Image (cartoon, rainbow, N blue to C red):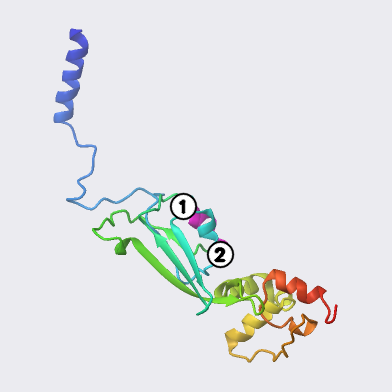
Amino acid sequence: MILPKLRELKEAITAIFSRRYTTKFPAEPHEPAEGFRGKPVPDDKWCIGCEACSEVCPAGAIEIEDDRKNNKRIIRRLYDRCIYCGQCELECPQPKPGVVLTKEYDFADFTKDSMRCVQEFELITCGKCGCTVGTVDQLLATARRIGPALASAGPEMILVRQNEIGAPGPQVRRRKEDTRSDIMVFLCPSCRHKVYTTEAGK
């Protein structure tokens, strides 16, 4: 029993006169190691509001709200729920991630307002049923990725690129029935299927 106690005493005395292993934070700022997963910050240059990050977030720290009345998509990032797993950065479909994990870790506050990040995107809704098609940035990014040849085959790609350059869209005469003349409007997959497969009077 004496030897273990002497060994513990030796380790305690050695620790007293040895160099500290911990940092001096918060008295001095601490520089995290390479690969540290800190606060995820969206990059407005690359984020397209596609909600892929929200789909893979295990903590539910990214909320998506589609305001179809005002054609806006609102993305709220709740840092008080975030577990800093890095899935939002890893699963971003953009060539460069639309959200990047920084080395920032000290952002505690007395209010939750500082723990929120809000983004807004222009939303595109279906011209028939009104459901969400996607954001303008999302469709433009898709058009650029697939190239002009393939983008010209999709009505949504054509329309969003016309809107980008300020060109007026085609004037479509609206009918009660679904006809092929309705293809040149923004449609959800379900309504587009009906337009392509349904003829007037059937």
Quadrant location, the N terminus = top left
Please say if the residues under marks 1 and 2 sit with CB atoms less than 8 Å apart: no
As drawn, 33 above or below 45: above
Crowd rating for badge 1 (residues with CA inside 10 Å; few <14, some 14–19, many 20+): some
Question: Where 41 falls versus 83 (above or below)?
Answer: below
Front residue (pair 135, 93):
135
Closer to us: 179 or 39 = 179
State the quadrant of the C terminus.
Answer: bottom right
Residue 76 on image: x %, y %: 42, 64
Q: Is residue 10 magenta?
A: no
Query: What residue sits right under mark 1 in the picture?
Result: 86
Q: Residues within 10 Å of mark 2 (few under 14, many from 20)?
A: some
Q: How much space separates mark 1 and mark 2, taking CA atoms?
A: 15 Å
Q: Secondary structure at mark 2?
A: loop
Task: Please provide the residue range marked out in magenta.
Answer: 86-95
Quadrant of the image occupied by residue 197: bottom right
Q: Residue at x 74, y 84 (%)?
A: 176
Magenta part, dominant SS: loop
Three-letter code for the amino acid on which mark 1 is drawn: Gly
Give the residue number, with chain letter if any, for mark 2: 94
Q: Is residue 197 visible?
A: yes
How far across and down, in percent of the image, does residue 2 sit?
17, 8
Q: Nearer the viewer, residue 28 or 124?
A: 124
Q: Amino acid at mark 2?
A: Gln
Tell me where residue 161 appears, x and y as whole percent.
63, 82
On screen, residue 90 above or below 143: above
Residue 42 shows in the view: no
Q: For residue 103, what is the image quadrant?
A: bottom left
- Image quarter of residue 173: bottom right
